[in-house]
Amino acid sequence: MVEKFLSKKIIIVTGAARGLGFAIAEACCVAGAKVIMADILEDIGKQACKQLCDKGYDPCFYSIDLADPEKIEDFCQKIEKDYGKIDGLVNNAAIATNVGGKSFESIDIELWDRVQTVNVRGTWLVTRGLSPLLQENARIVNLASDTALWGAPKLLAYTASKGAIIAMTRSLARELGIRKIGVTAVAPGIIRCEATDYVPKARHDLYETQRAVPGPQFPQDIVSVVVFLLSEGALSLTGQVLPVNAGFVFK
């Protein structure tokens, strides 16, 4: 069981309606945080929020669309109005298309732009919009991917976007460090959850046979690291990228 690292802290988790985002939101609740769940999947997100409420926690849900700057701005304004200040942000929301599919020559411009718009620009805009609300000693955790560490083939749009998240993490760590705000990134591999059901079996098999600790990874294998990175004790790790992938990639 996760210790109460985040007692009385207000933590925002984007992409929290399902999969890894939901698991992170639940783990933060268990760790004592007031969790703000945000997702474009409004109906699923509200159901997920109710599920946590039924367990005795007190999360809330807000709709957000990382492809729409106006909706991101509206979300940030609502958070400021309702909470004033926050203690942590988990930038988990992203889209992954074409896993194990098209080569780089075959990716169409529309797909490329969509992935970069949501994963890179959206993460930047959420972080920019919420930055004034971050308390001193707040934490940001960005969800990258180990695809950007080993150069996954036939996944260039997504891999490039997650490489940008790693670079963004390092720059933000330097810009926000003066406020004692720590910024780190977690780089999982493919996780077994409903959000990755579409991934070809061959790609799952690659990961699950080549990890130093063989077998599948699940959202619950990642969340304890995220909770720690949101805690006060994680400041010395700022700017770092942690490949939490059971040893598929060493960094």
Image: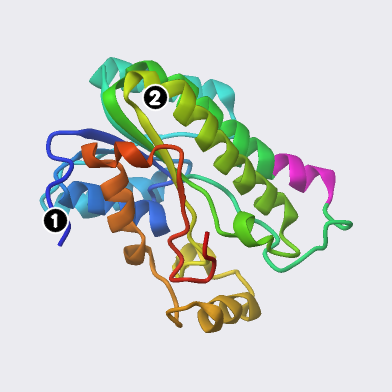
User: Magenta residues?
Assistant: 108-114
Q: Residue at x 47, y 26 (%)?
A: 174
Relative image position of residue 191 (x, y in whole percent): 47, 67
Q: Secondary structure at mark 1?
A: loop
Q: Residue at x 24, y 53 (%)?
A: 27
Which quadrant holds residue 139? Answer: top left
Discs 2, 1 touching: Cβ within 8 Å:
no
Q: Amino acid at mark 2?
A: Gly
Q: Which mark is residue 103?
A: none
Q: Residue at x 16, y 45 (%)?
A: 5
Q: Secondary structure at mark 2?
A: helix
Q: To which residue does mark 1 refer?
A: 55
Image position of 72 with respect to 119: above or below: above
* Marks 2, 1: nearer the viewer: 2
Residue 123, can we see it?
no
> Which of pointers 2 and 1 lies earlier in the amino acid sequence?
1
Q: To which residue does mark 2 refer?
A: 177
